[in-house]
Image (cartoon, rainbow, N blue to C red):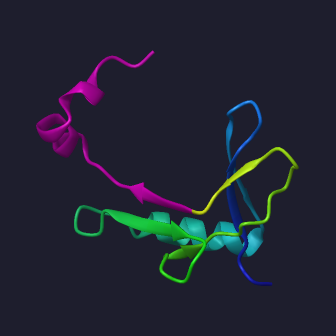
Amino acid sequence: MKPRVTVNLSSDGQFEIWMNREGRDRFVEELGMLHEGNDHFHLSSGDSGDIELSTVAYGPTDRVLGDGKVLFRTDEWDQLHYPHVMGKSK
């Protein structure tokens, strides 16, 4: 089967990622390749993304997202450039 990944916001604002087995494998593969020298990958409903997103909603009130990015950041990078995100976790 072709990888299928759908990213949406549900009617109550919950972020959801739906994927078949091949989509999961592709997503995990991209995650595994992230490091300081390769710090992001693109999700796109067009042919420009590293992972192609489906635009078909699972639910009638879902708002499907057609583009996005997954970013890898080290604590050192965030401490230097975005120290406000390094605050205490709740």
Q: Where is residue 41, by image quadrant?
A: bottom left
Left or right: 42, with 76 as reference point: right
82, 11: nearer the viewer: 11
Residue at 36% across, 63% down: 40
**Outermost right residue:** 60
Quadrant in which the N terminus is drawn: bottom right
Tell me if residue 75 is in the magenta stretch: yes
62, 70: nearer the viewer: 62
Q: Is residue 57 above or below residue 73?
A: below
Q: Is residue 48 above or below residue 14?
A: below
Left or right: 76, with 9 as reference point: left
- Across and down, in percent, residue 70 comes to 44, 57
Residue at 30% across, 62% down: 39
Q: Is residue 49 above or below residue 18?
A: below
- Across and down, in percent, residue 81 comes to 15, 40
87, 61: nearer the viewer: 61
Residue at 71% across, 77% down: 3
Tell me if residue 79 is in the magenta stretch: yes
Quadrant in which the C terminus is drawn: top left
- Across and down, in percent, residue 19 comes to 74, 63
Left or right: 12, with 77 as reference point: right
Report the number of numbered marks.
0
- Across and down, in percent, residue 27 comes to 58, 67
The residue segment tinted magenta is 67-90
